[in-house]
Image (cartoon, helix red, strand yellow):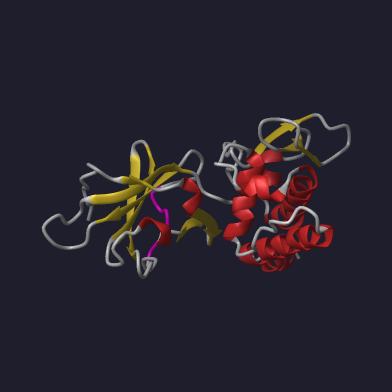
Amino acid sequence: MKRTFNYTGRKSIKRSDVAIIVREVAGSYELSVEPRLSSYSFPSSAEIWVEAYRNPVWMQFQWGSVGAPIPPANRQLEEFESIENVKFRLSVVQPEGGEHHKVLGVADSLSCFKPGDDIENRSELLVVYAEELDGLIWKLDMDGEAPALIINKNVEPTWRELASSNTFRALVYPEVFRRLLSHIVETNDPKELSEDPEESWEANWVRFAMYLGVPWPLSSSIEDAKEEWVEESVRAFCRRHDFLKILCESNINEN
């Protein structure tokens, strides 16, 4: 059932406090949401609603409460053939009572985290495109406004099929993640970057790593700590997306 909300007087929830993660499961897209709402003083019984939208397609999910976020039994994005340009909205809503469905807080125009399929439009995280690479299969460019994963345009049957293949995702994306984080800790002061109000692509990638459960090292003087942060973040990234299982299943299917 579609719920309509009253958005008058709502608080703005920082985008950095909501992680939207989409995984491809059995040919469809499964939604996960990780809200961080403890600093907003919402009632613990306030409802969490998550919407996915790309005109004219729209879906809505009830995600438990502020005190007990619980994903719905069915969180498949079955109305969307792809997640390209899909945006998300998280609303914290007054629970049952006189002002039921009044919105207390909202984070809108959220993008999702997903390595692999359909991420070339995720300009705030990673741009993916093709060009002539003179024999290289792929390379990472970090000189622009956002990092770019460039794939050889001469790959057959198409570079897009390579980018979305399980083998490519399992073998390449962990290395891309490692290079990005290594570059970040080598070229930025950790404390300053942790206070960046979502202005730089480096800060967005640090927040992504933190969503994986790896604390950001605030000290800029301990090189070993920064290196361990990179490695633990990559391990958490691989565990989150189960790349080992994906690669093994891909090899079995090919044989």
| Residue 77 counted in the magenta span | yes
**Residue at 36% over, 66% down:** 72
**Residue at 35% over, 69% down:** 67
Answer yes or no: is residue 212 visible: yes
Question: As displayed, is residue 142 above or below residue 185?
Answer: above
Q: Quadrant of the C terminus?
A: bottom right
Q: Position of residue 59 (x, y in %)?
A: 34, 50
| Residue 104 counted in the magenta span | no
Q: Quadrant of residue 211?
A: bottom right
Q: Position of residue 99 (x, y in %)?
A: 14, 54
**Residue at 67% over, 50% down:** 191
- Give the prevailing secondary structure in the magenta stretch: loop
Answer yes or no: is residue 246 visible: no
224 vs 35, left or right, is right
**Residue at 40% over, 48% down:** 13
Magenta region, residue range? 74-79
In this view, the residue in front, 97 or 24, is 97
Q: Quadrant of residue 100?
A: bottom left
183 vs 60, left or right, is right
Q: Position of residue 6 (x, y in %)?
A: 20, 45
In this view, the residue in front, 249 or 254, is 249
Q: Quadrant of the N terminus?
A: bottom left
In this view, the residue in front, 214 or 109, is 214
